[in-house]
Amino acid sequence: MNNRLSRIGMAFLLALGVILPNLAFASSSDDWTLTSSLTATSQDTSSKLAFNASRCQDLFDIKTGEVSFVFTLSSDATLSDSATYSIKFAKGNVSCSKDDLNQTTGEECALIASNMPLSATSSPIEVRRKVADLSSAANAEGCENLSESSYLYLIVNDASASSTPYTVTYLLDFRTKRPNAPTGLTGSAGGDSIKLSWTGVQDAESYKIYYGTEGTVINIGDTPDKISGAHTATSTTTSQTLKNRVSEDQTYLITVTAIDANGNESVVGEVITVETVASQDFWDTYRAENADVDGGFCFIATAAYGSTQEPHVAMLRKFRDDVLMQSAPGRAFVHTYYKLSPPIAYFIGQHSVARAFTRAALWPLYGFAALFMYAPAVLWSLLALITGGIAFLIVRKRRASKKQVLHKVAPLIAVALATGTMLSPNTAHADSPVNMMAEFKAGPYTPDNLGNAFKQHFGGDSGFIVEGEYDWQFWRGVGSLGLGFHLGYGNISGKSLQADTGEKSIDNTQLHWLPLRLSLVYRFDYLWDRFQIPFTLYVKAGFDYSFWWIEDGSDAIAKSDDGKEGYGGTFGFHVVAGVAFVLDWLAPEMEKAFDVEWGVNTSYIFAEYMYAQIDNFGAKGAFDLTDKATFHIGIGLEF
């Protein structure tokens, strides 16, 4: 074999295609490619091509009944003028000599091409074989239950460099025995889902579920290609729940087939009939009891003016569509506005004084929008005037003498230093300044002000909430004052109810909420800072806005019979009282190292009680997420 071919990594790339959208396998190299002349959509680095029952049968559906193999010489391959090749083929587990370009004595394989000259002009080389030549199957029906192999050999020799041929072997493996069909198929239905289970099959890699309503044809003993009108789903376990795939009050015909490692699929075994029922999720039941709670969001301008058709609202909507939505920053602003404005809008809509104040406050925005769209020159002139005025004030301020500035602030500095000396605790143990706090916590949360509907779907179960908090400590004296920003997530899961009986359905229904909180935080850490007593007391109070949404049995946003979607937002407030244990007290040396390495001054574990009233301050039609008695436990790090 030519040594130069060896140096450039002479190997081969195989891609055998048989006009199936998922059937093409290849073995890669630097110099050669063996590909199908038909469409190939995927490649496999293995030199083994497995034929299952359906692939074998589909070969007979090709007009010529042939598989075409095309060898293409890489453009950078280096060959001498004496390079030659042979192609051999053996069927039915017969092997060929790999080291001889000629057919040897007693060899049962076929010599397709013998000692042909190999050069750039001879590429590509095409070999066509009928499927009946590849296997013992004479027709599509003969593809069942095969267990045999065929081999294709490509042998290359460059006699000027070496007398040892280079050979690549491709295995065509026919494994078409179908696995057994699953047994023990059972199904139970809700309104939005069907729960299935069955007995597993040996050697099954996965399972395929066929289901459909009226018009679906599924007969026991049929091969899968004879099933018509059915939807499909897959599973790698012996159970599956069809969610977001079925509808209420329907009769479904269902079967499950097994698929082995070669892709062979069993025939249809058992077929069952399952009837779905009408069911009510939590939003359905809640809306029946609270018709004034619509969910969704209303927005500030509409709430202030009372109608989407009011001229001022129409102007702002046109500004949104024609100006803001035409740029990425504008779209981001609109997206943020839609998220943050609902609680404000809801409050405005409930109070006439707030509506009047908001209409006045919106006049500058209304004027800006009108100028931007209809008189941009006037707008830019005003902006230039304002910018110039700000610049003038900045320059004027910089001209003030440093002595005058120091004279004005010196008394304030003196008072601050004196106050800090008298009130600040002994912080000699702290190696770095403290100005922020991070907390991570979790606990139960039960919004049980949602009435009888909540009890029907969720019973006595409690939901949970996880929350992160960042505090910025803007004052430190006897304790500290800070501003806290919270982001949390809560969830509670229950069952839908059967509409006719009121009994629990297999369908789940879930309530999710995402609270955003702003708190004023006071921490009394004087005992630790002054006396090394490892306890800190604290209180928090502030405002909340909780996004919420309800899911039905298909894990989609629930929708009531009158078309109202189960999502929205509710405004409220919270009060917290807690106690923290200072972990640094247990390992003071570790605390110092933690401070030096990470800047963490103090670490805590804590427990806190929270009263959260999330009901739009008692406004009518609010989705009430109040929990008057919940607690959190967590860990805090002070920086």
Image (cartoon, grey):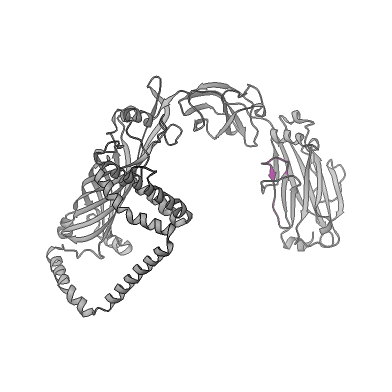
On the image, the x and y values in percent for residue 140 come to 75, 30
Quadrant into which the C terminus falls:
bottom left
Residue at 38% in and 50% down: 337
**Compared with residue 39, is residue 599 higher up or lower down, i.e. above or below?**
below
Q: Nearer the viewer, residue 365 or 272?
A: 365
**Is the stretch drawn in magenta largely helix, strand or loop?**
loop
Q: Quadrant of residue 226?
A: top right
Residue at 70% in and 33% down: 53
**Compared with residue 79, is residue 612 higher up or lower down, i.e. above or below?**
above
Task: Locate residue 62 relative to residue 519 in the image: left or right.
Answer: right
Quadrant into which the N terminus falls:
bottom right
In the rendered structure, does residue 21 fall within the stretch colored magenta? Answer: yes
On the image, the x and y values in percent for residue 60 come to 76, 34
In the rendered structure, does residue 11 fall within the stretch colored magenta? Answer: no
On the image, the x and y values in percent for residue 584 come to 24, 56
Q: Quadrant of residue 483?
A: bottom left
State whether residue 532 appears in this view.
no
Q: Magenta residues?
A: 17-29
Task: Locate residue 134 relative to residue 461 in the image: left or right.
Answer: right
